[in-house]
Image: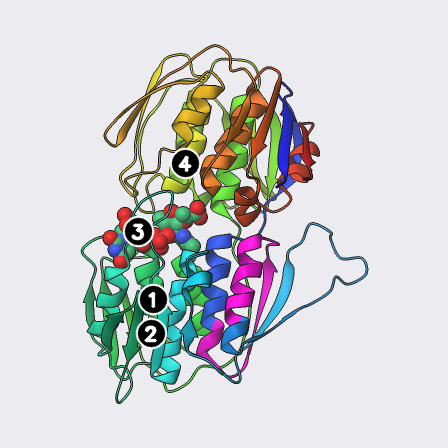
Amino acid sequence: MDRIRIVGGQKLAGSIPISGAKNATLPLMIAGLLTQDTLILENVPRLADVVLLQRILGNLGVDIMIAGKRAGADPNSGRTIHVSAKNIVDTNASYDLVSQMRASFWVVAPLLARMGEAKVSMPGGCAIGTRPVDLLIMALQDLGAEIEIDGGYVIARTKNGLRGGKIVFPTVTVGGTHTAVMAATLARGTTEIENAAREPEVGDLADCLNKMGAKISGAGTSRIVIEGVDKLNGTRHSVLPDRIETGTYAMAVAMTGGDVLLQNARPELLQSALDVIASTGASVTATNEGIRIARNGGQIAPVEVTTQPFPGFPTDLQAQLMALTSRANGTSHITETIFENRFMHVQELARLGARIKLDGETATIEGVPRLRGAPVMATDLRASVSLVIAALAAEGETTVNRVYHLDRGFERLEAKLAACGAQIERLSA
Ligand code: EPU
């Protein structure tokens, strides 16, 4: 297994191109199942999760073609993929694949809407919490699906197709909202979703589906209304920039000091996180090209932050913020309200010298003047990258093990950081 070796202490300076968002790409690829025509997605990041989803969709009969680079094209631009679900040959998704990537469970919605049946493995728990799918099942039932659970599989059927209905989510769920939106596009009649997730990735999915001929209004608010249509067509859509990658590099600069332009980043996708970063003492400036983050000298101020659904502070930046505040001049409190077990990074940050105490869902972080490098490992994507950030600001050498977690969600991480002066390299196994 590959490792990443970092020698900390360098300020970051330069520019980092922000990739297309992983969490928008996945539902967009899955939405390709809703049409017989070809869906062309641009700005797709090169990530292990995209490759895995490609395999899962391939098993269902979806043809995915990845366009090569044109001469003269920007080497940092994302890829263009053609998703063609002309013939769906299978409506089953097995445990060995779905358990590797939870988002692949969402194929249940388009399969059911288009084929009238789907048998998809329940994903199981994961390193950040139990993560049930009861609300996704509820949404499909509200649209008239008959659901049975057998042998760890969700078996969903409709006799005469899905019909519009009212879905009221008791908690905000991104995957539940994606599922409900995809299923409702091809249902007969009108669907109303109350307490819908307002995450930008839901808006990106709805924009793409509307270009495909769907009639969705209100995406980005907590009430989404969908008029079902008979069929959808292909289109061309560019994936929105990754707000979590943006926030991650912004926090890296806020921690090491320096001056970096995050190219193509869009402030409105992560305003609450940018406000928190600014409150730690970094300067955050929106420019025509993206977001510029700088910190030159000065201490890191402590923060009080609670994770919330969008537009609140995202859970996917919680671990990175904990790394940043571990070097603050004072005590910070971070409360995690989305996932009950998303604190696996605490013990690893402690190996670098961080002082963090956990009490239920709240972490108390007593800032220390310096961190020192050490071997560390992590159990999920965002936790791993929090260790990278901390290592960049630590004295001496850190090796981060289990790099495959990083490869799931950060495109060319070492290259992007090295281009800004970080001493970081991948050690191949
Ligand atoms: N929940 C239920 N029942 C359900 C579904 C969700 O109780 O049927 C609960 C969850 O257990 C959690 C809360 O609702 O406590 C929110 O979960 P949500 O459904 O919103 O999460 P998700 O759709 O499974 C997506 C992202 C996650 C991100 C969360 C929250 C993708 C592929 N995944 O997950 O991203 O943390 O939304 O914003 O979009 C990551 O990228 O590292 C990652 C984990």
Distance from disc 2 to disc 3, alpha carbons, whole Å, reads 21 Å
Question: Mark 3 CB in 8 Å range of ligand 1?
Answer: yes
Q: Is residue 275 left or right of residue 373?
A: left
Question: Mark 2 CB in 8 Å range of ligand 1?
Answer: no
Local packing at callout 1 (Cα closer than 10 Å; few below 14, some 14-19, many 20+) is many
Whether residues under marks 2 and 3 lie with C-beta atoms below 8 angstroms apart, the answer is: no
Whether residues under marks 1 and 2 lie with C-beta atoms below 8 angstroms apart, the answer is: yes
Residue 198 visible to an observer of this rendering: no
Mark nearest the camera among 2 and 3 is: 3
Was residue 147 drawn as part of the magenta stretch in this picture?
no
Q: Which residue is mark 4?
A: 273
Mark nearest the camera among 3 and 1 is: 3
Q: Which residue is mark 3?
A: 131
Q: Name the quadrant of the C terminus.
A: top right
At numbered mark 2, what does the secondary structure look like: helix, strand or loop?
helix
Which segment did they paint magenta?
32-57
Distance from disc 1 to disc 2, alpha carbons, whole Å, reads 6 Å
Q: Quadrant of residue 338?
A: top left
The residue positioned 51% from the left and 59% from the top of the image is 25
Question: Which of marks 1 and 3 precedes in the sequence?
Answer: 3
Task: Residue type at mark 3: give it.
Answer: Arg
Q: Which residue is mark 2?
A: 183
Task: Residue type at mark 2: give it.
Answer: Ala
Question: Which of marks 4 and 3 precedes in the sequence?
Answer: 3
> Which label is found at residue 179?
1
Whether residues under marks 3 and 4 lie with C-beta atoms below 8 angstroms apart, the answer is: no
Question: Which of marks 4 and 2 precedes in the sequence?
Answer: 2
The residue positioned 45% from the left and 32% from the top of the image is 320
Distance from disc 3 to disc 4, alpha carbons, whole Å, reads 24 Å
102 over 60 or under it: above or below: above
